[in-house]
Image (spheres, grey):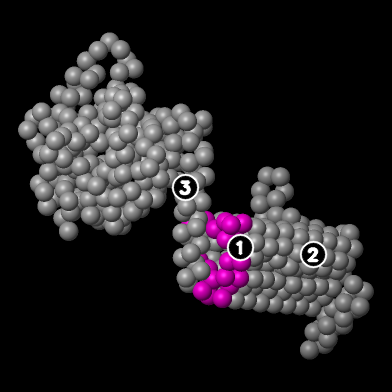
């Protein structure tokens, strides 16, 4: 397959989102919308990606700081045609074929992009417009074809003639073009459209179809069939709809890998996680991006596993337990009503109901170590930083103050927690024995 460049149009304000955050940075399954588009293009084989930014450009550029992309600035924002011209001028494509896609199409299919490029190259077209037929085309640009079935123009909803409103073939916002053929037509088109004192005037990419036809260049409308790949996000409702679409597909992936999800409709799993075989996820569980879960674990119901957490094999995290930036070793368990933050829990340790690791002092967060087979009693609080030794016991209701080290095998109880008398005598005897050796 021929290499191609890609331009992501991400300069729009996204006013219908009603947000100070640029639309393309809104997350879907823990990943910004823009990253979904970028990843699909890379999977399709794009060797060169250009992102056009405008509204919220500082935020988007900061987000892309470590990404393998080039950035073009559209200032002011004067339409999609103007945005494409800025991309081609500021970041000349490294390949003859260029795929152009809106940044609000997070469910774009990489296989479909490959097919689009093949269509473009095999037909030596100046421009290929991806089209599809939909049952409810309202709000979408319609594909107008000539008598010989060739695409002649794209007409936006507001400009439709009465006879055109019933057309079901629409523009899907995905294009491929030969920039060497297109640029000599695009530049004068944009200049003409913006040659007015009206600063609100814009140059639209869709008008390029008509202009290329006038120039005698080949433009084709490729009917790919409509599917979820073109679920566009313009407002919060569509964001939720696309999120659920992606979530269903993501959960199906894990169930195919041998993970049991008892109630997919009430479970939320972000992207960028790992889940081992024969793990069971109970209803109303949330698993955030970056979590690693081993084999044969039991998660939930009503559990919240936050980013930076690793659960090794055979771990149990039960109802109303939150685990954040923590590691739970093999066979450890926290079955009820607990908060574990910035803690390393040893093998086969038990965290009792209502136990809290108080990791935040109001300014900084601190870590805690809990050893193998330690027992943390119900309603106890361990104030970080702290260390609970292997097979140590923190009695129910105890408060372990910050900086305390509970020695292996000892029991602490009370507020503040103190070593149980029997354990203190045992510890003193050990010290005396050590002195005599």
Q: Could you give the CA–CA distance between mark 1 and mark 2, rounded to whole angstroms? A: 25 Å
Report helix, strand or loop for mark 2: loop
Query: Which residue has dot 1 on it?
Result: 263
Q: Position of residue 92 (x, y in %)?
A: 18, 39
Mark 3 or mark 2: name the one nearer the start of the chain: 3
Measure the alpha-carbon separation of dots 3 and 2.
37 Å
On whether residue 158 falls in the magenta region, the answer is no
For the residue carrying disc 2, how many other residues have a C-alpha within 10 Å: few (<14), some (14-19), or many (20+)? many
The residue that label 3 is drawn on is 242
Residue, x 82% and y 68% (percent of image)? 377
> Residue under circle 2?
353
Assign a secondary structure to mark 3: helix
Residue 374 to residue 232: above or below: below
Give the residue furthest to the right.
421
Quadrant of the snapshot with the C terminus: bottom right
Q: How many marks?
A: 3
Instruction: Find residue 169 and report its horizontal and vertical position in percent.
Output: 29, 40
């Amino acid at each position: 397959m021929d290499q191609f460049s890609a331009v992501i149009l991400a300069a729009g304000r996204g006013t219908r989102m009603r947000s100070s955050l640029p639309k393309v940075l809104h997350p879907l399954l823990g990943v910004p919308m823009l990253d979904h588009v970028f990843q699909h293009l890379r999977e399709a084989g794009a060797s060169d990606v250009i992102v056009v930014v405008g509204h919220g450009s500082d935020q988007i550029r900061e987000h892309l700081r470590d990404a393998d992309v080039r950035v073009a600035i559209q200032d002011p924002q004067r339409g999609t045609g103007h945005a494409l011209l800025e991309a081609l001028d500021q970041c000349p494509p490294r390949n003859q074929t260029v795929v152009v896609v809106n940044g609000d199409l997070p469910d774009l299919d990489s296989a479909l992009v490959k097919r689009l490029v093949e269509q473009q190259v095999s037909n030596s077209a100046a421009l290929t417009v991806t089209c599809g037929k939909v049952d409810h085309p309202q709000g979408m640009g319609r594909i107008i074809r000539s008598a010989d079935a060739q695409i002649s123009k794209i007409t936006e909803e507001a400009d439709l003639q009465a006879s055109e409103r019933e057309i079901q073939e629409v523009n899907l916002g995905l294009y491929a073009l030969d920039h060497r053929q297109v640029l000599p037509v695009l530049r004068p088109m944009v200049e003409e459209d913006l040659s007015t004192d009206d600063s609100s005037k814009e140059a639209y990419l869709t008008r390029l179809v008509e202009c290329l036809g006038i120039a005698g260049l080949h433009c084709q409308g490729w009917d790919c069939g409509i599917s979820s790949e073109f679920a566009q996000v313009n407002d919060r409702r569509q964001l939720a709809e696309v999120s659920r679409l992606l979530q269903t597909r993501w959960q199906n992936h894990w169930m195919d890998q041998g993970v049991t999800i008892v109630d997919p409709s009430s479970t939320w799993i972000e992207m960028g996680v790992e889940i081992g075989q024969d793990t069971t996820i109970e209803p109303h569980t949330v698993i955030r991006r970056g979590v690693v879960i081993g084999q044969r674990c039991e998660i939930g119901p009503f559990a919240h596993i936050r980013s930076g957490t690793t659960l090794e094999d055979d771990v149990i995290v039960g109802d109303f337990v939150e685990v954040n930036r923590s590691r739970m070793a093999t066979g450890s368990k926290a079955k009820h009503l607990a908060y574990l933050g910035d803690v390393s829990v040893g093998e086969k340790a038990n965290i009792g109901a209502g136990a809290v690791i108080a990791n935040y002092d109001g300014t900084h967060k601190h870590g805690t170590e809990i050893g193998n087979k330690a027992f943390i009693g119900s309603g106890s609080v361990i104030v970080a930083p702290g260390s609970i030794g292997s097979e140590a016991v923190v009695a129910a209701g105890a408060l372990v103050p910050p900086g305390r080290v509970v020695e292996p095998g000892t029991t602490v109880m009370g507020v503040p927690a103190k070593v149980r008398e029997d354990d203190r005598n045992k510890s003193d005897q050990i010290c005396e024995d050590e002195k005599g050796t």
